[in-house]
Image: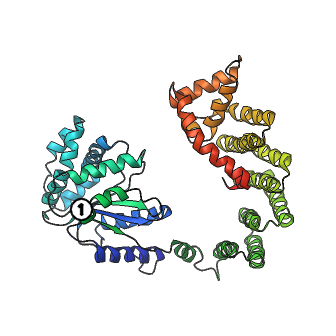
């Protein structure tokens, strides 16, 4: 590993924090970091679970999904057995001269879906693995980072159960927690004598800057990235003249590379940062220049600029919105949707029409709101159930079906059938619950002129 790599340096720092704070009696450990730093936690766990780990313990790391507290131990056992059974793992064990790990009782409980037994067997499986590894007394760390988590409360409940299970000494559970949310605080407080919380300033912005701008003096792409960082820094400092200086350098750098995508990115990034200074004349000049560039490139066959063109339209709408040119703002949001349909970017079209729908709803424009919803919902047969669940479609679907429920409407019937497929017969109740939080947030953004960044 490159010891001077900014990421490696920070993982090494995490190792030192661990060595300084984690003691053998700790049964519960968490890294308390910013949400966006979960990759560093993942990197730390993956390193320690590899032959190159720097902490003297047995370390196993899983991404196992967390849904319900009463099934999670079963899911972990199943995940572990699957990894043990993997052909590549079996070959490595044979090469190392390892015998056969007797997993019969664990496999039986998993196969029979005996969830209560799995809760009790997880600590036993860990001890069995320590024995199999020839290190029965080694400190063992079970590191977890669920790729999906339906309910933090359920995971908290599972941790509570884990702590109540009898275990051999030296078995430690490691989890990731968010600094601002403190999701697992309750269980850590309940077991304060057996737990430890690790914190460290990872300085990720500095790391990203170091990586992105390495070689900026000779590499035009690296210099372009440097311009992006400096523009952001100038904006944070509310220094408009410095932003203008680095914005001009970014545009010049984009032109020198000959890369039209880079140049189009320079225009829109610079314009976006000028929103903080309400320089509408310059914003419009940059956006209009970028739109012309994107259209020319797309007409010439460069399809990679299509998503950026849609973003330009949304920025134009946002700028009109801030200047209280409300009808013009709505036109730009609708234009982004229409263009996305033409590009066959269906989910992007739904998002653009949703921006128009929220904006029209906020302004009390009933006809315009209905038109935006209709345009989005007319894309129903182009969307998969997964795309519907991941988009803003359900909110417009709910509203439209409610509005048309007393009328014969084939579109409402089609939409209702699609939503039933995606969410079940009780779909309206599910969306009603989501709607209160999500739509309220979007309306607040619309009021603040923040809709362009959603």
Way the structure is coloured: rainbow
Q: Is residue 431 visible?
A: yes
Q: Secondary structure at mark 1?
A: loop
| Circle 1 crowding by C-alpha within 10 Å: few under 14, some 14–19, many from 20 | many
Q: Position of residue 127 (x, y in %)?
A: 15, 56
Q: Is residue 373 above or below residue 148?
A: above
Residue at position x 48%, y 62% from top? Answer: 180
| Image label count | 1
**Residue 412 quadrant:** top right
Residue at position x 72%, y 62% from top? Answer: 261
Which residue appears farthest toward the bottom when viewing the image? 217
Which residue appears farthest toward the top when viewing the image? 408
Q: Position of residue 33 (x, y in %)?
A: 44, 66
| Circle 1 residue | 27
**Residue 408 quadrant:** top right
Residue at position x 15%, y 43% from top? Answer: 104
In the depicted view, which residue is nearer to us: 212 or 430? 430
Q: Is residue 295 above or below residue 106?
A: below
Q: Quadrant of the N terminus?
A: bottom left
Specify whether 174 is left or right of 408.
left
Residue at position x 35%, y 56% from top? Answer: 186
Q: Position of residue 308 (x, y in %)?
A: 72, 55
Q: Is residue 61 visible?
A: no
**Residue 376 quadrant:** top right
Q: Position of residue 159 (x, y in %)?
A: 30, 52
In the depicted view, which residue is nearer to us: 439 or 274? 439
Q: Is residue 275 above or below residue 206?
A: above
């Amino acid at each position: 590993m490159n010891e001077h790599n900014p990421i490696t340096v920070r993982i090494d720092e995490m190792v030192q924090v661990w060595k300084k704070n984690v003691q053998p009696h700790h049964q519960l450990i968490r890294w308390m970091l910013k949400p966006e730093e979960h990759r560093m936690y993942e990197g730390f766990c993956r390193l320690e679970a590899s032959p190159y780990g720097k902490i003297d313990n047995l370390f196993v790391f899983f991404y196992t999904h967390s849904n319900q507290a009463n099934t999670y131990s079963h899911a972990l056992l199943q995940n572990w057995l699957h990894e043990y059974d993997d052909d590549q793992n079996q070959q490595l064990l044979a090469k190392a001269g390892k015998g056969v790990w007797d997993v019969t009782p664990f496999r039986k409980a998993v196969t029979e879906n005996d969830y209560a037994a799995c809760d009790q067997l997880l600590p036993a499986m860990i001890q069995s693995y320590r024995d199999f590894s020839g290190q029965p007394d080694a400190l063992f760390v079970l590191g977890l980072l669920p790729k999906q988590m339906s309910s933090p409360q359920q995971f908290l409940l599972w941790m509570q159960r884990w702590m109540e299970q009898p275990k051999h000494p030296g078995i430690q559970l490691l989890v990731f927690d968010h600094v601002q949310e403190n999701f697992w605080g309750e269980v850590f407080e309940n077991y304060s004598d057996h737990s430890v919380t690790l914190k460290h300033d990872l300085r990720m912005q500095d790391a990203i800057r170091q990586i992105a701008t390495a070689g900026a003096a000779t590499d035009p792409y690296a210099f372009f990235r440097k311009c992006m960082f400096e523009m952001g820094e100038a904006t944070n400092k509310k220094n408009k003249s410095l932003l203008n200086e680095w914005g001009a350098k970014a545009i010049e750098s984009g032109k020198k590379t000959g890369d039209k995508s880079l140049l189009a990115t320079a225009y829109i990034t610079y314009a976006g940062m000028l929103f903080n200074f309400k320089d509408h004349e310059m914003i419009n000049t940059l956006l209009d220049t970028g739109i012309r560039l994107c259209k020319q490139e797309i007409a010439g066959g460069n399809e990679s600029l299509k998503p950026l063109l849609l973003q330009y339209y949304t920025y134009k709408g946002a700028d009109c919105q801030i200047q209280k040119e409300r009808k013009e703002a709505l036109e730009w949001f609708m234009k982004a949707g229409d263009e996305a349909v033409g590009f066959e970017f269906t989910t992007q079209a739904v998002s653009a029409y949703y921006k128009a729908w929220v904006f029209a709803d906020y302004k009390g424009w009933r006809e315009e709101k209905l038109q935006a919803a209709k345009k989005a919902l007319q894309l129903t047969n182009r969307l998969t159930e997964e795309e519907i669940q991941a988009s803003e479609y359900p909110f417009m679907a709910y509203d439209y079906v409610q509005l048309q429920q007393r009328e014969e409407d084939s579109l409402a019937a089609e939409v209702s059938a699609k939503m039933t497929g995606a969410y079940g017969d009780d779909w309206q109740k599910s969306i009603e619950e989501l709607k209160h939080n999500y739509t309220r947030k979007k309306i607040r953004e619309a009021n603040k002129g923040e809709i362009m960044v959603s």
